[in-house]
Image (cartoon, coloured by chain):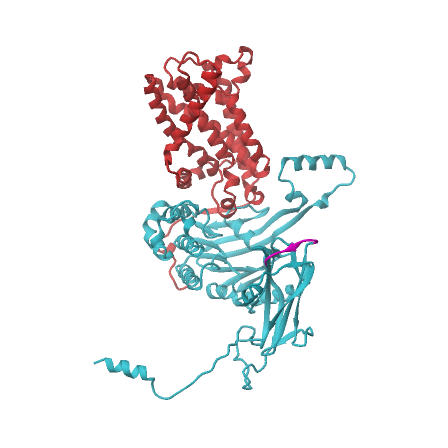
Chain colours: A red, B cyan
Amino acid sequence: MSELNLDQEHPVVLSHVQIRPVKGLLDLDLSSLWHYRELIYILVWRDVMVRYKQTLLGVAWAMFQPIATMLIFTVVFSVMGKIPSDGFPYPVFLYAGLLPWFYVSQALSRGGTSLVGEAPLISKVYFPRLILPLSATIAPLIDLLLAFVAFVGLMAWFEVMPTWRILLLPLFAGLAAMVTLAGGLWISALYVRYRDVGHILPMFIQLGMFVSPILYPVSKVPESWRTLYALNPIVSVVEGFRWALIPGFQVDFSMFVPSLGIVFVVLIGGLIYFRSMERTFADVI
Amino acid sequence: MGNVAIRAEHLSKRYQLGVGAVQHNTLRDHLMHGLRILTRRGTTQSGSDTLFWALKDVSFEVKRGEVLGIIGHNGAGKSTLLKILSRITQPTTGTADIYGRVSSLLEVGTGFHSELTGRENIFLNAAMLGMRRQEVRRKFDEIVAFSGVEDFIDTPVKRYSSGMYVRLAFAVAAHLEPEILIVDEVLAVGDASFQQKCLGKMEEVSRSGRTVLIVSHNMTVIEGLCERAILLEKGQVAKVGKTREVVEGYADAIRSQSGTAIEARRDRVGVGEILLTRIEVLDSNRHPVSAAITGRDVIIRMYYRCAKAKEFLNCRVSISVNGHKGQDLFVLSTDIVDPTPLTLRGEGYVDFILPELPLTGGAYFFQSYLESNGRAQDWIKNVAPFSVLDADYYGTGNLCPPGWEGNGVLLRYRWESSEGLPDATVSSRAHVH
């Protein structure tokens, strides 16, 4: 070896990694996510790019889709079905619910399939696997933002003036992201092991729309069922969005307590489960 | 300790094969399995879950700046070892200490997305291989120039030819600058001139003082790049030392392995509905022989057997000959000499009739490949040895020059000699004043 070694010229402390079988459950190692932040960024960017490539309307789809759904549902459920909306214009009421719902359903299905969908990556490169469900949860936030822009137009049309509460919207968007990440962690890791998840997930998401107050107000849920109903964390997300977006919208914040607790438990449990399964992903996938 | 880049100690990796691993991919299978265990409590079926050690007690050290080759048959554990060292999968037991930033290249074009342009894919792929965005920006022009796809850099890669795709992918990888580089058989892509370029790049990388671990089936590449090599056999280190000695050990191993019956071979790739069962070498009288003779007519007979009651359309039967270092010498394939569609059913054989066998004497190996409708059915590397006895090919009484045994294709040619310089040189000289 006559050639000079790069590292002898500039002596640096070489990073040291020890590879060994890991069996513990509580080794979360979230700092590695920070180290790989650029990969998170680029995967989010890729998801957004790929989604609207070779489409005529491009990102306009992110607005068109919820608007079209809102129009159809307004006709079916409000005009024909006479579903009440606590006295607010039904289109505004509905759209304020569809906004988080589109995000949650999309992030859940993308996050849930993020590992199996990237199987070649998992068996060929190393990176913290958590990045996949995480970036799949972040990417649809861009669509959420665009759909929100459309909502501003809708509010102007119905002459609804937003209040200071709208500033708290990011808080509820953050809650929505937490909810979907919690679900995404479990679903994606289970999907690696059990391909049944691929069949269950779409059904599960469809069901989710009906057990959350998207089409109807919480006031339509019988009082005796409310406690059970509030265990669904999407209820809090949707109510939070409506509270922030629709002036005068009343929310019973005590409902948030059980669902926040559930999100917390499911998220931490999901992290631990994901981490413990992560080691065998490349072998099983 | 300061000059060690990688130290592997007693690395082992166990996989589950058979019923246990293959069918437990749905929830129902898990439930059924649990049920079965409950109901058949007396007759435990521990045999249904076959444990397979892909690696067993592998220990070695790589010094900083060293280029280490890893060789061995398919299924010897090479890729598993690289995956463990790249942290893709974890060992069942044992440890590996790695000093320095690692980049591994187990596949070219990992993460390439067909809808994205060449430019976008460069950034994407680089990020996946652990390159920082700033670094990519700095090297971007260099990468594009190396790939030679400048004109298509803003075209989605789905419109690329496979050659362009591979060139772009390799160009990204070639510009990684880790302290330790782990490479798995990635040089076997692209056309010859691009391969040469990649090889040059690899040599440059190894000279720059980086630690490199490289897996290849091409012994010429291994011998050219590595000072030291490891031979893996059935998951264990069979030999470690100077590349030349280890490569020789590998050649011996190939010889002994290709002696085993083809039907019993497990290192085959493909659907497996058509299987190669036997290979015979025959002389021009169709008598089986143990060795062919240089310059004589020879018949290579490949026996096949198809899955019952099924007909296979558009088949391709092919056999290639490898030199003793594993290099590909030539291929015989049914479709290239005769485009009539070949249909296979039941059992049978295909004869390749070679007039005047153009190989120097020595030990060669066959590689067999069967396909139907474009799907690989049965592919076996080093399927059988092929011995050739040297004889006077050109009728001059001379044999091939030393060093070419088991290593050379003979061509028909002639040569001429004359005194003085050819006229062209004279006239070109006349132009110079």
| x and y percentages locating residue B61 in the rendered image | 52, 56
Report which quarter residue B346 is drawn in. Answer: bottom right
In this view of the protein, which residue sits in the foreground, B196 or A87? Answer: A87
What residue lies at 47% left-to-right and 31% top-to-bottom? Answer: A106
**Up/down of B207 relative to A160, above or below:** below
| Residue range of the region highlighted in magenta in the rendering | B308-314
| x and y percentages locating residue A187 in the rendered image | 54, 33
| x and y percentages locating residue A178 in the rendered image | 46, 28
Residue B63: within the magenta?
no
- The quarter of the image holding the C terminus of chain B is bottom left
Residue B260 visible in the displayed image: no
| x and y percentages locating residue A184 in the rendered image | 50, 32
Q: Which residue is situated farthest in the front direction here?
A: B340
What predominant SS class does the magenta segment belong to?
loop
In this view of the protein, which residue sits in the foreground, B38 or B427? Answer: B427
What residue lies at 40% left-to-right and 62% top-to-bottom? Answer: B197
In this rendering, position of residue B431 left or right of residue A140: left
Residue B312: within the magenta?
yes
In this rendering, position of residue A107 left or right of residue B154: right
Q: Which residue is situated farthest in the right direction here?
A: B42
In this rendering, position of residue B39 left or right of residue A7: right
